[in-house]
Amino acid sequence: MAIKERMSGNEAVSYAIRQINPDVMPAFPITPSTEIPQMVSTYIANGEIDTEFIPVESEHSSMSAAIGAEAAGARSLTATSSAGLALMWEELLLAASNRLPIALALVNRTLSGPININCDHSDSMGARDTGWIQIYAENNQEAYDNFIQAYPIAEHESVHLPIMICQDGFITSHAVENIELIEDNYVKKFVGTYTPEEFLLNPSKPISVGPYSISSYAMEAKKNQEIALENAKAVILEVAKKFKKISGREYGLFEEYKTKDADYIMFIIGSAAGTAKQAVDELRTCGKKVGVLKLRVFRPFPAKEIANALKGCKAVAIMDRCESYNGNTGPLGSEVTSALFNNKVIIDTVNYIYGLAGRDFTVDETKAVFSELEDMVVNGKKIEQHKYIGLRK
Amino acid sequence: MNNGIEIRWHGRGGQGAKTAALLLADVAFKTGQNVQGFPEYGPERMGAPITAYNRISDSKIRVHSNIYTPDYVVVVDETLLSSVDVTSGLKKNGAIIINTPKSREEIAEKLEEYSGRIYTVDARKISEETLGKNFPNSPMLAAIVAVSGVMDRNTFIKEMRASYQHKFAKKPEVIDGNMKALEMAYDIVWSAVEGDKMSLSA
């Protein structure tokens, strides 16, 4: 029943949007996500979907318009990258705290400066504490599959939170690869129609959205938001289970690739996970017990599950495609080590920074990381924590 | 990557090297293969050197890095030979294909560090004869298919016609010219490839 196709990551997400036919899409173009609103507006112009497209003057406005539309009761989405996401900053927090299940197609690109159009995760990692659910993709297939699962997760009655579906700028967004698409009717049935319990354009039940909250109540609102994000974990797994029935493809909070008996594990997000898996296969033929843990869901952060998955190994390379500028670790470096510590899993870790601003990351570099971990554990070699890969000498 | 081929394209912004890489991915996909076609992006502008890549394989492709040890290199603009290290990492048992009116012997002198096979095709001339304009990417696409053998001539020609009919739905008058360009380039390069096989087995 699968439709075998070839398309880029941006085409794949646009295709999913066409199948979902959301109500409202405000958008402002920014490389490398520009193709998404471009392709969706073509679908609209061709009469294939009846989404209301709102061309706006900035990303601050696109997220504001998405918030307005969603609060009114319309299923809304937008797409952006890099500085576009940064300009949405205040609105990202409003979308989450007003519990509006907006979907955002994020095509990861570095933040300035130096100004650069290529991939790293500094945009979405910078927005990690805004209350959004964040799901990452290794390739065009996962970007497509994750987008189809976005609304069933975000709109779930125990969640009601906005969701960011991330893919790596250019590396997957502009690369044409094979993909298996699902027929329109299956996707439509899977995503369903949006029936919010409360919305502004409901005269029989008037509500207020985004009012001032005094200190005696605001903290409870924030706690409820935190509970919703925790609830999302179970919902993500439940939606993945249902998705498997229409696609045959399996998704979890993360993917464990040959980690069960692994001595050394690379912990990584996004397109580089594919490159790492290739290196693992090659090293396994030489008898090295290595594996990859690819994080799919970064928010909510599956700390306990990660600690549990890593506890049997000797050392972990935590790979950050983003710098935190804290003089200590990248964002994954700090979250994974705290997950390990809090769950009393004491193993060696090295936090590597790679692939900033589109710097390539290769199979050979993956192998070098594994060999460094082995050298550290077996020979007691001291490895610098918070180490950069592929820097010019 | 196991049991697959890797191709690197060198061209200049505006010549269609990226489009050619994506078309190659397209046509290889149609023959049931796993494909990747992607450009290396930078501050591209007309005339600046650009690079694009293809991976084609029987098995699923997972690697998402650029290609450093290609099986084949395609040079869409001969002037790049003096500014870009086009044979960097190119496998000795692979080949390089260059758009030039020069002979392979003349090119071999310029690429003296490369000992593998060299093929030349005058894509500009073919394009001007068949299309009346210099669009070198169609002939170069045919050339890489002939050299790499990713599919046979009949399949390639059949799939490309379908592809052009879709791509040029609004200007069908250019389809025949493009098809002619593909066939001419394919046949020129194919006879050079066959000639090499004969001399190797002799």
Image: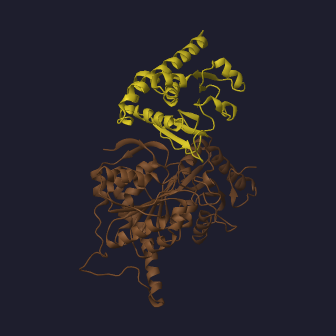
Q: Quadrant of residue B67?
A: top right
Q: Describe residue B190's horizontal placement relative to residue B10 as left or right.
A: left
Residue at 44% across, 32% down: B28
Identify whether A290 is placed above or below A204.
Answer: above
Spot occupied by residue A5 in the image (x, y as percentages of width and height): 38, 41
Q: Quadrant of residue A279?
A: top right
Front residue of this view, candidates A351 and A213: A213
Spot occupied by residue A382 in the image (x, y as percentages of width and height): 76, 58
Color scheme of the displayed model: by chain
Q: In the rendered image, which quarter contains the N terminus of chain A?
A: top left
Identify whether A383 is placed above or below B75.
Answer: below
Spot occupied by residue A285 in the image (x, y as percentages of width and height): 59, 40
Q: How many marks?
A: 0
Identity of the residue furthest to the front in this view: B132
Residue at 29% across, 81% down: A206
Q: Describe residue A377's horizontal placement relative to residue B200 as left or right.
A: right
Identity of the residue furthest to the bottom in this view: A216
Is residue B173 visible in the rendered image? The answer is: yes
Spot occupied by residue A221 in the image (x, y as percentages of width and height): 44, 82
Front residue of this view, candidates A324 and A226: A324
Front residue of this view, candidates B48 and A146: B48
Q: Which chain has been coloured yellow in this picture?
A: B
Identify whether B88 is placed above or below B183.
Answer: below
Residue at 40% across, 50% down: A39
Identify whether A189 is placed above or below B167.
Answer: below
Is residue A250 visible in the rendered image? The answer is: no
Q: Describe residue A206's horizontal placement relative to residue B200 as left or right.
A: left
Identity of the residue furthest to the left in this view: A204
The tint of chain A in the picture is brown
